[in-house]
Amino acid sequence: MTNLRRLVLGSAAIAFLASCAATAPDADAPKGAKYDTSWPDGAAASAERFRNDLTTLAGDEYEGREAGTPGYDKAVDYVVAAYKEIGLKPAGDDGYLQQVPLRKEKTVVEASVVELAGADMQIFDDFYVGASTYHESFDVTADVVFMGYGLDAPMFGQTAYDKIDVTGKIVAVLSGVPDDLPSEENAHFNRASTKRDAAAAHGAVGFVTLNPTGGFSGSRLERAAARASDVVVHPDGKEKEIAAAAYLTETGTAKLALAAGMSADDFKDGMAPKELGVSLRIAGASEWEDYESPNVIGVIEGSDPDLKGEYVVLTAHLDHIGKLRVIEEDPDKDIINNGAMDNASGISTLLEEARKFKNGERPRRSILFVALTAEEKGLLGSEYNAQNPTVPAESMIANVNLDMPILLHDFTDVIAFGAQHSSIKETAEAAAGTLGVTLSPDPVPEMVLFVRSDHYNYVKVGIPSIFMVLGFENGGEEAFRGFLSTNYHRPGDDASQDIRYDQAARFAEINYRIAKAIANADDRPTWNEGDFFGDYFGK
């Protein structure tokens, strides 16, 4: 799971994953396996298949499955072989594969320039120019327009772009968002990419983030310049991108204010959009390294002639973070981040769902199984798949995502992040209830996990989506916190943990029942009336 340590470690509230109810034992099951009496025959076999998938994908020979490496490609081969054995039909662009064009981009520091009349602007002390995904070099000079927080959100009274025409201008915005936005909407609008996209949509040619009270220190910007970032290369990206994007430190913001005859204190919440009466030059260049890494996509075709052209999209990310970067060679040091819980457990759940669909009655709608690449690099595989699907975009009716189910304890409830936004909540609640498992509300809404995993890229193209994890009850908080502090994004996340494969099989069964219920319903899922995400993306 991407960046979870940054979100969770420092907050007692975020421990959110938990474990499964123990019931009648099965003599043929793996150690510790217990099952509810409502389980169908074959529960023990399901647990054993799960064990085989997880221990294989989390093995050292897969070298942590980092996207773009031989270890990840080996994991792709494993999933392709599993899809073939199960009997899924290929649904990628090339057989089961959808190659995702990726790029490592890095700022060329020596080419970075911000020029302002009457000011001596020094890189890192005053500014930083970001890399461009689609322009190897750029040089833009234009008038600067202050646009508050830079939000294009009339539903929250943020309508600066209705007041000033920014065509051909450089838009300057405050970092952050207003305090009164709800948490999930706050997280969406707080993204630099959301603000830059809004400026580009209104014709801006440059973008500047202001920090009147600090935030982007020189040392932080220097560290950012030293790192390469991974991004998706979209076919139409060059036409949409604002290449010239800069960040101004507190001192850089003060210099811009002075040139505009203002004080840096004037750049604050509530200041009206304003033509600053100054011109700014932003120039820069980027270093690129291109590579590809595939999503793996298979399909079970629906049985209903009228509904089989609609798809329930089931996703889990296949990649992890690879090996530790070590300076001194130590032959005894474990340097492989195996990613058993993150996310071999999610892929194993996906594969077990596919077997259940293939062995049972065909669903009315088609089921798309997508093992995603480059989640750990910024949700990149799902970004590409959602925007460049291998089936008609309008035919994808729902997404159920699996990311880091922690299978280290017995669970009595599950959580479906995002369920409150659509009719999928009732479907998930009823399906889980058939096994005596409750659907709990998001226990940590302030952490906005709804926008922080692969499903959110499907939300952004209008598809009702949920992100499934084990629940918070019955000791789950303690189990998750222990995993996070000990093994998350570390070599200790391997198959030697006390993994409850009986609980893994139950979790797969619940997810299967949720997906089946969506696929067999008379009506496709709908966004709730007045829901922000449905109104903002769904229309």
Image (spheres, rainbow, N blue to C red):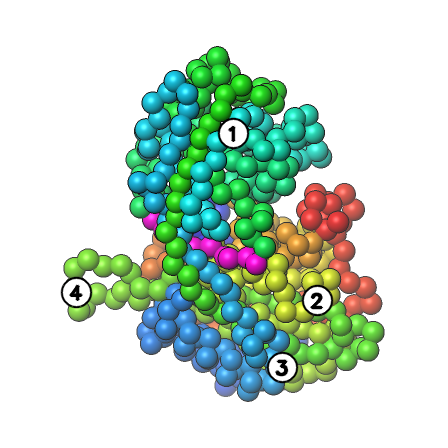
Mark 2 lies on residue? 392
Q: Which callout, 3 or 1, points to the residue nearer the camera?
A: 1
Across and down, in percent, residue 161 comes to 66, 31
- Which residue is under mark 4? 330
Taking 336 as reference, is 462 left or right? Answer: right
The percent position of residue 521, horizontal first and vertical second, equals 79, 68
Q: Which residue is mark 3?
A: 89
Mark nearer the viewer, 2 or 4? 2
Residue under pointer 1: 142
Q: Is residue 513 above or below residue 477?
A: below
Amino acid carrying mark 1 in the image: Ala
Q: Residues within 10 Å of mark 3 (few under 14, many from 20)?
A: some
N-term-proximal mark, 4 vs 1: 1
Q: Which sits in the foreground, 293 or 405?
A: 293
Mark 4, residues whose alpha carbon is within 10 Å: few (<14), some, or many (≥20)? few
Q: Residue at x 65, y 29 (%)?
A: 165
- For the residue pair 298 and 336, the one nearer the viewer reads as 298
Q: Earlier in the sequence, mark 3 or mark 1?
A: 3
Residue 270 painted magenta:
no
Count neighbours of disc 1 (C-alpha within 10 A) and say few if under 14, some if 14 to 19, many if 20 or more: some
Mark 3 to mark 1 CA distance (whole Å): 53 Å
